[in-house]
Amino acid sequence: MADTQRREVETKNKVITSIFRISNLLTQQIDLDEILYSILLSAKKDLGFSAACLFLVNEEKTLLECRMITGFGDKGEYWAYNKPFHMDKHDCMETKVVKSGRVMYFEDTLNDPRLTAIDRGITQRLNRGRVVYAPLTVKGTIIGCMGVNRPMVDLTISEEEIEAFTIFANQASIIIENSQFSKQLMSERNLNESILESSPNGILTIDSDGRIISLNRAGEDILSVKQGELLTMNMSDAVDRYQTLSILRDILLHPSIRSSREYDFRRDNGSRCCLEVTPSPFKDIDGNETGTLFLFRDLTEKKIISEQVQRMGKLASIGQLAAGVSHEIRNPLMGIGATLELTLENLALDHPQREMLMRSIEETERIDDIISDLLDLARPREMNFESGNVNDIIKEACQFLSGICQKENIGLISDFDDALSSIHMDKDKVRQTIINIALNSIQSMENTGVLNISTSAPNRAYYTLSNGGIQITIEDNGKGIAPEMKEKVFDPFFTTRPDGTGLGLYNCHKVVEAHHGSIFIEDGASGGTKVTVLLPGTVE
């Protein structure tokens, strides 16, 4: 009686030790295979068995697969991993346990009458002796089975040991289920993070207390902030600290606003930024609102292209209108001119009206010249394209401008990117375009200031050219251009100078357009005006 009680106490202690050992696996971030291997090692070491195996059901394929096995020798274990049981076709002790949900003990795995030919074949391969199999059950669903082995030469497996192993298997089921659930959660989390990081739009989330809890990579670029600096910071503190967030203050500090808003502003470096910000409620799996998600769309390039298309359409309409009006004026003007010339021919050389008629003829000729200019507005520019280095063209322009700058007490700074490739262009017209833009800059600085002219590869954060190309930047620190005037500077006959014709920048735009390029006017980083000219590598 005393021996029986002692064995029961020892068995219970073994169960407690083994359960404690495998329960620690719940607190560790390890993969499923490591967990299964640790469970089998504990079954061997703590419960006193020589070998152990664990099978899990693959519901998609209706298979019972060996996921972990130890103690049966390398060849036997290799065979077990590669020979899964089909739940409907294979009749063996493993499938019996899974189908019945009962613990099964086989005292002799060669002679037990319940065994099938499959069981005996496996016993010979694995050299099995006495075997206990217990189902692995989670929330009423059998997910597999676990078995332990003891050689025939050793003691039989007692009822206390079978009960202890059953308790151990139940605990193992919980650990396996939690591990699989954690793996699924981690997989879903990684997928969500991958989606967020792959999004071209910026995404920022705050909790119900206004603390920033996430910011993706695109958000870092768009907002010019680092995720590590923002996380756990309160939004009210962040908008006071960061320039871009400060501009968006009204919507970031009032997330209850559910409509999108657009912002058009200048970054610290002077570059233009157009953002669309859309707030939406951030909810948990139960549908409870726990914060706000802000979606940031960078519309800068889209806005620039849209404005350029609108400008080109407006200029084309103006050019066509001017050409039509000019054509109608030229016909009667030719009649007036012919009449004046005929009258002049019939007057004596000393006639008092002769000088008046000659001045009238000169004025009609001047009007005709203006009409020719108007007709040029709608006429496509004829270009003489050839391969050339834009740096050489800009250097020639700078040589022409240097004397004017010196006379006007203006500093001229040039910076050339020597790595630029040659492009196809009309060299004379590109040179004249740069000179015209620079002359406007010189005139805006009023006898003092600095003119910067540079070449570089296109800044693809703001501008896009599909076939390479170059960027020419002319920047001054003059008085700048009023916001309401920027949309008009490329219009024909628009000028702010009393002696201006208003055709200089219009002609520049036409030349750039003929090159399939783009021209933009922006505020300079230190005041004044910055004009950016983009020319493609080739002209289609």
Image: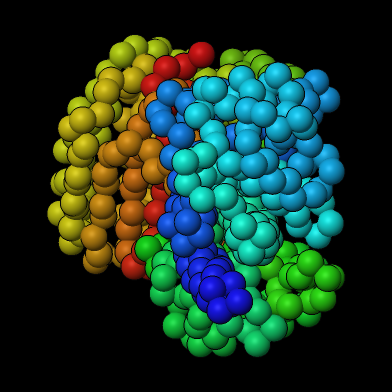
Q: Is residue 373 visible?
A: yes
Residue at 31% of width from left, 30% of height from top? 431
Total of numbered circles in the picture? 0
Asked if 163 appears above or below 81 in the picture, the reply is: below
Drawn side of residue 291 relative to residue 450, left or right: right
Q: Is residue 321 visible?
A: no
- Residue at (16, 46) in percent of width and height: 403
Q: Nearer the viewer, residue 15 or 399?
A: 15
Residue 89 placement: quadrant: top right
Identify which residue is drawn at 71% across, 77% down. 291
**Residue 371 versus residue 187: which sits nearer the camera?**
187
- Report whether 413 appears left or right of 129: left
Q: Quadrant of the N terminus?
A: bottom right
* Image coordinates for residue 284, horizontal then vertical, percent: 76, 70
List the single residue furthest toward the front.
1
Q: Position of residue 29 (x, y in %)?
A: 48, 61
Q: Residue 497 location, x and y as percent?
A: 47, 57
Coordinates of residue 239 in the picture (x, y in percent): 53, 81
Judged left or right of residue 162, residue 21 is: left
Image point (41%, 74%), residue name? 229
